[in-house]
Image (cartoon, rainbow, N blue to C red):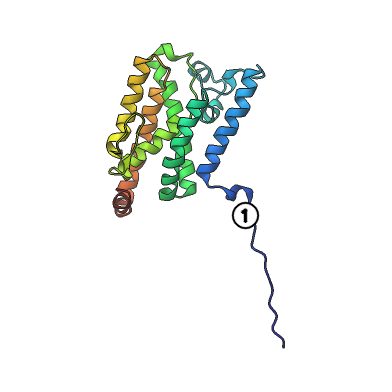
Amino acid sequence: MGAYSYYLPPKRKSLLKTFSINTWIILINVIFFIVTSTLLILNKIPVDLIAIKPANILQGKYLWTFITSMFMHGGLFHLFANMFSLLFIGSLIQKILGEKRYLIFYLISGLFAGAFFVLWTFVSPTDLNTFAVGASGALFGLVGLLILLTPNLPVYIMLIPIPIKMKYAGPGILVLLWLISIAGDIPIGNTAHLSGLVAGLFYGLYLRNKFPNKVKQIGKIFS
């Protein structure tokens, strides 16, 4: 019997597996921003169709905006700031959690932030007709998680040229954004930021209780 060898070409990656989940989230944000911004400028669609508005939600209308608002932004700077942050923070958490858990956690954080933004109108009814967009709620969920998993991780935050430990940087960013919104009268979604952070903290507590040894190891690696 002769010996035969066969050449099997390497399997091609599917389009979905070409990029990581975090990269896909960033790409979807950018593409969605370009498409929806164009349609809004051309008056092809109303903003109610994309942005979350408490008055609409409480009437049972445009419920899908809980999702679409997470992938829409108020301008190029808003988009750049969130995607630049997501590039680094999201990539780190994706390595820690794995792609599937990371995606689920990211979406839940964003949905929780949107729900809290709507519920907040019972405290502040003046926000009923305020629109909210952006990945910030989900992004702050990631920040909250890092506060508990990697509290001593040195990070840089805007306007501060020195690294700050994650456990101080997370709350510091919230305070800084709150001060900016007051001083400059800028419409920043502080309630969504806070609720996203809380979602991340709760998930971080869950992981610390269920996987204490792994969490300690992660904290040592990223410190």
Q: Answer whether residue 218 is visible to the viewer in this image.
A: yes
Residue 3, how many percent across, how many down?
69, 84
Residue 56 vertical position relative to residue 148 in the rendered view, above or below = above
In this picture, residue 11 sits left or right of residue 78 = right
Rate crowding at label 1 as few (under 14), some (14 to 19) or many (20 or more) other CA atoms within 10 Å: few
Looking at the image, the residue that sits furthest to the bottom is 1
Residue at 67% x, 65% y: name it: 9
Residue 149 vertical position relative to residue 40 in the rendered view, above or below = below
Q: Nearer the viewer, residue 105 or 74?
A: 74
Tally the numbered discs: 1
Disc 1 residue type (three-letter) = Lys
Looking at the image, the residue that sits furthest to the front is 161
Q: Nearer the viewer, residue 181 or 63?
A: 181
Q: Nearer the viewer, residue 21 or 128?
A: 21
Looking at the image, the residue that sits furthest to the top is 126
Q: Nearer the viewer, residue 173 or 194?
A: 173
Residue 201, how many percent across, how many down?
33, 37
Residue at 32% x, 45% y: name it: 149
Circle 1 residue: 13
Secondary structure type for disc 1: loop
